[in-house]
Image: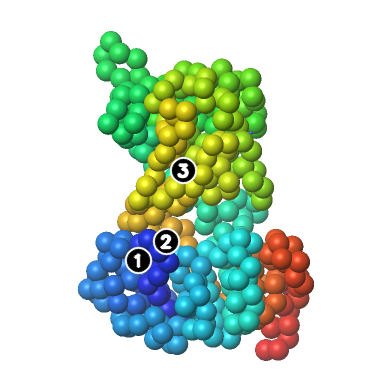
């Protein structure tokens, strides 16, 4: 198959969808990979490394879209890419259609085959192509929290791990999923005293088993949250209720119960945030202060560490991209339920229920569409 990897042109996006290691794998399976010149630069991969791995370089994004049967990307296409997309061209990338009517209509009109990273789903309902970015954001949350806890950054002036004779910082982690687990591990590793709260007792049992001795598990409820925020130095928000806005677990009134210089990192900000006073910020201006409490609410945290994020993402996407290239999307999606769940729009038809519901547009079952392709063969 001919695969195309364009440069990401969305503002401040430095990741790239295929690394030189990925190119080697595609080549080993007999595929041709075209990558746009300098596409890997933001993640630390040079044109020479891609050439050595066996990629072909093209100068412009127009050339990439024009030669490729499958486009592999990181972020959804933006308006200036829409006209470049061809009928039946396979696009494998994050789309998040439900948040953009414009993108949904554009992809219907272009009659492309849109396979979205975020809806590829395993039998246990986990989302393998979202997990790596939660891992990055969870670990980063502690790094950022520790930084803003420093006095010159507006924090209380506390060292996370303390020193001999001085107590370490108290870290409260709300939500014990991927983000919360990674945050708790990092904070515990740096010597902080960590409390992790979740509403799921089975999850708390699991965390209790695997976490080191300086991590406590506590049931998440308003009473417990009120008690803990009074002595926490860093509070991480990592809750998720799938498909819904995050619940407001810390209200504005509760900020007055906290000590001045407490740092709150709202990782769940991409789902609206789990603190009432959260609003999305950027890497250029990541924090603001409300009632003497520092808020860090960057909606695309992994964007600050593109090298790590690119490797984490491509480690997860490459096996799926290879299946698509080896079998073609129709056969790959017929054989793999995981990949079939990734299909969102196929040749003008919406085949993912969440997208049709979001905009009240007609829905067609993906099996029906796949059957129509196989009978056409
Ligand atoms: N800001 C960023 O850059 C960034 C990056 C990656 C992920 N995220 C976001 O982080 C959030 C968490 O992602 P995840 O992958 O860890 O999700 P996850 O599904 O693995 O974990 C969410 C956890 O929250 C728990 N929960 C639900 N309601 C709760 C409550 N009231 N109190 C305590 N816990 C509660 C659930 O039981 C679950 O264990 C999501 O909104 C995700 O989109 C943000």
Residue indicated by mark 2? 314
Secondary element at tag 1:
loop
Residue indicated by mark 3? 297
Horizontally, residue 376 falls left or right of residue 62, namely: right
Q: Estimate how packed mark 2 is, as few (under 14), some (14 to 19) or many (20 or more) residues with alpha carbons within 10 Å.
A: many
Horizontally, residue 20 falls left or right of residue 205, namely: left
Which callout, 2 or 3, points at the residue further toward the start of the chain?
3
Q: Estimate how packed mark 3 is, as few (under 14), some (14 to 19) or many (20 or more) residues with alpha carbons within 10 Å.
A: many
Horizontally, residue 263 falls left or right of residue 219, namely: left
Ligand 1 within 8 A of label 3's CB?
yes
Front residue of 324 and 224: 224
Residue indicated by mark 1? 19
Secondary element at tag 3:
loop
Q: Residue furthest top?
A: 165
Front residue of 110 and 340: 110
Residue at the image position 70 percent from the left and 89 percent from the top: 376
Frontmost of labels 2 and 3 is: 3
């Amino acid at each position: 198959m001919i695969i195309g990897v364009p440069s990401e042109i969305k503002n401040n996006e430095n990741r790239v969808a295929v690394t030189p290691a990925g190119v080697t794998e595609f080549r080993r399976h007999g595929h041709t990979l075209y990558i746009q010149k300098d596409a890997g630069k933001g993640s630390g991969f040079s044109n020479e490394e891609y050439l050595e791995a066996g990629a072909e370089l093209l100068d412009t994004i127009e050339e990439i879209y024009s030669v490729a049967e499958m486009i592999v990307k990181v972020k959804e296409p933006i308006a200036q890419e829409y006209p470049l997309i061809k009928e039946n061209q396979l696009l494998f990338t994050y789309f998040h259609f439900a948040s953009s009517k414009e993108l949904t209509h554009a992809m219907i009109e272009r009659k492309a085959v849109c396979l979205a990273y975020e809806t590829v789903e395993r039998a246990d309902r986990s989302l393998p192509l979202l997990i790596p970015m939660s891992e990055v954001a969870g670990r980063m949350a502690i790094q950022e929290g520790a930084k803003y806890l420093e006095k010159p950054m507006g924090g209380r002036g506390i060292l996370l791990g303390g020193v001999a004779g001085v107590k370490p910082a108290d870290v409260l982690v709300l939500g014990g999923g991927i983000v919360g687990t990674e945050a708790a591990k990092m904070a515990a590793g740096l010597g902080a005293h960590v409390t992790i709260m979740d509403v799921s007792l089975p999850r708390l049992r699991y965390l209790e088993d695997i976490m080191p001795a300086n991590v406590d598990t506590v049931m998440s409820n308003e009473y417990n949250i009120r008690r803990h925020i009074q002595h926490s130095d860093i509070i991480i928000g990592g809750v998720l209720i799938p498909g819904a806005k995050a619940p407001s677990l810390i209200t504005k009134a509760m900020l007055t119960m906290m000590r001045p210089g407490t740092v709150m990192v709202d990782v769940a900000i991409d789902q609206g945030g789990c603190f009432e006073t959260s609003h999305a910020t950027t890497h250029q201006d990541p924090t603001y202060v409300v009632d003497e409490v520092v808020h860090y609410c960057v909606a695309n945290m992994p964007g600050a560490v593109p090298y790590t994020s690119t490797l984490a993402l491509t480690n997860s996407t490459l096996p799926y991209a290879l299946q698509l290239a080896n079998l073609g999307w129709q056969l790959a999606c017929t054989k793999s339920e995981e990949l079939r769940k990734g299909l969102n729009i196929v040749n003008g038809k919406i085949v993912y229920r969440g997208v049709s519901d979001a905009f009240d547009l007609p829905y067609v079952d993906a099996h029906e569409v796949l059957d129509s392709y196989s009978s056409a063969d």
